[in-house]
Amino acid sequence: MTTKLNDFTKLCVHTQTTKPWNLRECVENYSAAGIKGITVWRNVLEGQNLKEAKSLLDDFDMDVVSVARGGFFPAVEAEKRQAAIDDNLIAIGQSTGVGAPVLVLVCGADGRQPLEKSREQIKEGILKILPEAKAAGMKLAIEPLHPMYAGDKSAINTIAQANDMVEEINSEFVGIAVDVYHLWWDNNLKNEIKRCGKNNNLLAFHVCDWNVPTTDFLTDRGLMGDGCIDVPQIRGWMEETGFNGYNEVEIFSDKYWATDQNQYLKKIKNAYLNFT
Amino acid sequence: MTTKLNDFTKLCVHTQTTKPWNLRECVENYSAAGIKGITVWRNVLEGQNLKEAKSLLDDFDMDVVSVARGGFFPAVEAEKRQAAIDDNLIAIGQSTGVGAPVLVLVCGADGRQPLEKSREQIKEGILKILPEAKAAGMKLAIEPLHPMYAGDKSAINTIAQANDMVEEINSEFVGIAVDVYHLWWDNNLKNEIKRCGKNNNLLAFHVCDWNVPTTDFLTDRGLMGDGCIDVPQIRGWMEETGFNGYNEVEIFSDKYWATDQNQYLKKIKNAYLNFT
């Protein structure tokens, strides 16, 4: 049985969910809405002094749940793979700077090579940045992405594949971010969440909904309750493992971005209590 | 090792691939291009006398590989499920009418209910039409669809799920259509094709490519060689099982539909020899 969510203590919003807002607007408005959890996307840190960003987050008593996103390791060209490593090291630094305990990885894929090759390069990339992550006390969360992104965004498309990789790497600093949007269709999801939890590898839980029909590959995600995902059921599976983290609202939506973001935040809170 | 395709004896084109053409245009032009295999989509049979359609196909010595498509069994409402059964019986009649040995099933999904429920209704639906299929000597091919269609087009999204269902139903008249577009991303694909072949359940093989990036959920499929799918590798896995059927070109593409269809047919033949 999934418990009911009665308050907002476990609600986290991704800054990308309210894309029209800069970091200050996110922090001020989330805080005013009684939302403490924030996942900071790197775009809102661009051109920002990291210390000032951290002060801002602290001033409003925000809990930085994670930073999104590192990854994108695979490439046919060695120099591109090295550039990805460099960028991930910057991302670890940014995550440390804003006080996040987790850096989310969208692992990447290069359609010019087999998925197996991209997966090898993902593993190599993670192993290369792992010492820096360890030194920073930063956990890396592999986020398996929907198979519709296998051509260009991630060669890790099921939680089973993510579990395999995380178990191979076998470090307390590498785990998994479960996003209902990417994984809801998988009939092995319940068992693989259980497997992941048993190994203490569940680092994050992202929620939104799958619109029927979906009209865009990137920016047509639904708010919980808009679509066909049974989010409470999946949250229940997470909680059965002992997972006690935030429920992170991560929605890319041209439709919602075009609306008043404070009104949208109210809708998010309503959807959180009723459909999450 | 995948063998090289040196001629067009195993090339089949779906009428939907050359959507601007009606049945007569498909038959005349495929035939003129030396293509014998045709999979007839039901839309080109609309308003046609079935006997005349059959005569046309016979006159040009076409080999009707299958009819597409039946299925769409799940629905919350019982009357809609019954309407689907009725429509599938019509589809079996049409398939018999044009001399096809196989009817392809896009199984359906209703986003208002759990995927498990939709899968139950798919199984029920297939069992309901099976006596008619048997009587007609018509094989039913479950086509697992890409997970991006789980919300509205098919609750069967992996070949493993299709294998499970086909083995449960356990009839020589129910098998599987493998489409590279839907299944290429799956790291279990090779093993599941093997499993399917072992049970003599491989009924059809559909080819196209996955464009990177893909911009539309339905009509942005690529011609073999355009995208990131290693079609020869998957064809090799099919052939290793003893599969000896047609390689069916099924491409929905606004881009190619907007071009001269005879030129497109030349491109298809070139892509068939070099990237299939």
Image (cartoon, coloured by chain):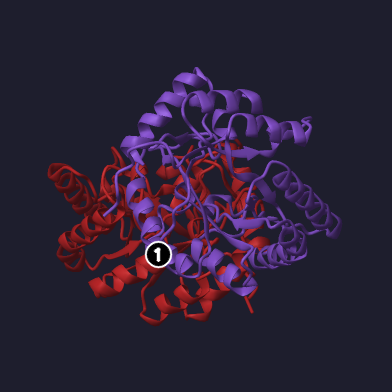
Chain colours: A red, B purple
The extreme top residue here reads B260
Question: Can residue A276 be seen from the camera position used here?
Answer: no
- Which residue is painted at 19% across and 53% down in the image? A89
Does residue B264 sit above or below B187 in this rendering? above
Report x, y in % for residue A168: 25, 73
Report x, y in % for residue A231: 60, 64
Does residue B41 sit above or below A191 in this rendering? above
Judge left or right: residue A93 versus residue B99: left
Judge left or right: residue A16 versus residue A69: right
Report x, y in % for residue A29: 52, 48
- Near-viewer residue (B55 or B41): B55
Tag 1: amino acid: Asn
The residue singled out by tag 1 in the image is B188
- Which residue is painted at 50% across and 23% down in the image? B32
The answer to which image quadrant residue A57 occupies is bottom left
Determine the chain carrying the residue at label 1.
B
- Near-viewer residue (B195 or B75): B195
The quadrant the C terminus of chain B occupies is: top left
Q: Secondary structure at mark 1?
A: loop
Report x, y in % for residue B49: 79, 32
- Near-viewer residue (A215 or A59): A215
- Near-viewer residue (B214 or B79): B79
- Which residue is painted at 59% across and 43% down in the image? A214
Question: Can residue B123 be seen from the camera position used here?
Answer: yes
The answer to which image quadrant residue B238 occupies is bottom left
